[in-house]
Image (spheres, rainbow, N blue to C red):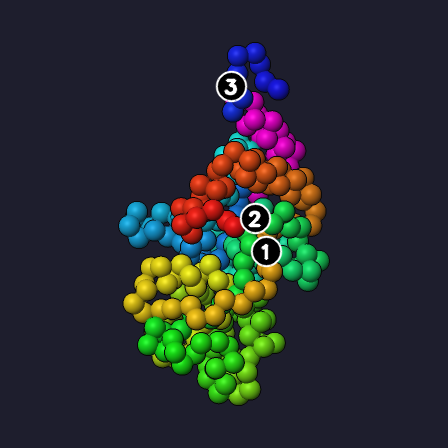
Amino acid sequence: AGSKGSTPGSAKVAGLSAKLSGVKLVKDGTLTICSDIPYAPFEFPDDDKGGELTGFDVQLVNSMAKSLGASTDWKTTPFDSIIASLAAGNCDMIASATTIKPERAEKVNFSQPYFDADQSLLVLTKNKDTYKQLSDLAGKTIGVQSGTTGADYATANAPAGATIKEFQGADDLFAALSSGQIDAVLQDYPVNAYRVVKNPQQFVVTQKITTGEQYGLATAKSNDQLTAALDAALAQAKSDGTYDQIYTTWFGQKQQ
């Protein structure tokens, strides 16, 4: 569609922006987004750019919003209360490396999956031969982030005598590992892998745990139209190469 002489690109955007027509938003023309910030490499302030928000989720959702003709407003929200915050109407959607789970899907609508993720074990480099896998942490302390699938996995699979210690933020986890409060971090592989990329001298991933997890963008149960709009924008980002470009920026290659 589009008037004669318009470019295919502008016609695409016009078609997508119509998908937000009539959608009730916290602020007209803006997608207000609840996100657990910082959670590198998905959402975090870039200290090299004056604290500007960046990350995989940020770049992907900002590009999707643009194709829908909307701006974005990111709201820092602790992960363990993020679904309640969406339900309370504080935001239109959640973009926060959120694994699609049946019990969460009872409370929110999920978009189509946008990221394949697994769990992993991160330890100090000096301990890489001691803690090669989760079973090596019997009697040790494993750090997890509250309310995450990593916390669920640790609870279900920790070896005998292991203590599971919860932290509210990902940065708190890495600080606790560095200071010796915990012996390992169990959480999403891409988050641990990115930390190793940033600091290979200090950290190493010793085990990748395949769980088949996928991330989705979440909207309120009553907002089917917004879910459909996000699915359309995600499909376009994947078809026009935007998704691959952003993925490669953060992970060095296209998603396999």
Residue linked to disc 3: 7
Callouts 1 and 2 close, C-beta under 8 Å: yes
Tell me residue 47's x, y (percent).
31, 53
Q: Is residue 219 visible?
A: no
Residue at mark 1 to residue at mark 3: CA–CA distance: 35 Å
**Label 3: which secondary element:** loop
Name the amino acid, label 3: Thr
Please tell me in which quadrant of the rendered image residue 123 appears.
bottom left
Of residues 157 and 26, the one drawn nearer to the viewer in this rendering: 157
Q: Tell me the element at label 1.
A: strand
Residue occupying image coordinates x 59% and y 56%: 214
Residues under labels 1 and 2: Cα distance? Answer: 7 Å
Mark 2 is surrounded, within 10 Å at the Cα level, by few (under 14), some (14 to 19) or many (20 or more) other residues, namely: some
Give the extent of the magenta segment.
Answer: 10-28
Q: Residue at x 55, y 35 (%)?
A: 239
Q: Which residue is mark 1?
A: 214
Q: Could you tell me residue 250's position as x and y percent? A: 41, 50
Q: Residue at x 45, y 60 (%)?
A: 191
Labels 1 and 2: the sequence-earlier one: 2
Task: Tell me, yes or no, whether the highlighted magenta stretch contains residue 240.
Answer: no
Quadrant in which the N terminus is drawn: top right
Question: Vertically, is 157 above or below 253?
Answer: below
User: Where residue 190 appears, x then y in whole percent?
Assistant: 46, 59
Residue at (37% x, 52% y) in the render: 45
Query: On the image, numbered disc 2 is attached to which residue?
Result: 114
